Amino acid sequence: MKKQYLIILFALSILLVSCLSLVMQNPSFVLREITLKPLSLTEMTLMIGLDVKNPNCFDLTFKSFEYTIYLNNEEVGTGHLEQEILIPSSSTTRVMAPISAELKNWGGSTIRAILTGDKLLYKIEGQIDIKTVLGGVKLPFSQEGLLN
């Protein structure tokens, strides 16, 4: 009898996690700033400031966050955060995220735009692992915009 309850409870928890996407709206990302931190003549770390908007009426906790950044349609680099990030309900939170980048992969127009502060087209895509009561849920995302 207890086995049946455990099986039913397990099945319900799987069902609830899979239905989370029906109740949860995806967070949105806006790239607000880029800071260069040179490591060598060919490698650098970029710190990007992302405004993460949570449109839900409940808090979201990111367990991990993996991403790739494109500037002016060129892949600049990738990064990941392995720390929990709390995004309160119905609010926007600034997240500083590192990117490992190699300059040899960049075009001259991208470097010039970063150094002169010109407008940059950006795209960020990746995957968020969101913490829930029943475990983690992986959520892919992709966002494009213009960095002034």
Image (cartoon, rainbow, N blue to C red):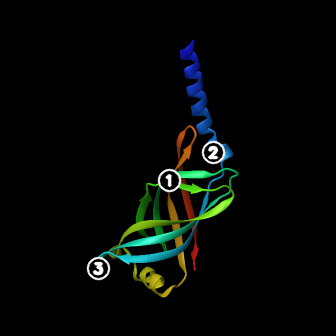
Residue at the disc numbered 1: 84
Mark 2–mark 3 distance (CA, rounded to whole Å) = 44 Å
Mark 1–mark 3 distance (CA, rounded to whole Å) = 33 Å
Q: Position of residue 21 (x, y in %)?
A: 63, 45
Q: Relative to 148, is 123 above or below?
A: above
Residue at the disc numbered 3: 41
Q: Quadrant of residue 10?
A: top right
Residue 73 numbered mark, or none = none
Residue at the disc numbered 2: 21
Observer able to see residue 74: no
Q: Amino acid at mark 2?
A: Ser
Q: Amino acid at mark 3?
A: Leu
Q: Residue at x 57, y 63 (%)?
A: 143
Q: Amino acid at mark 1?
A: Glu
Q: Residue at x 47, y 65 (%)?
A: 97
Q: Residue at x 61, y 29 (%)?
A: 12
Q: Secondary structure at mark 2?
A: helix
Q: Secondary structure at mark 3?
A: loop
Q: Which quadrant holds the C terminus? A: bottom right
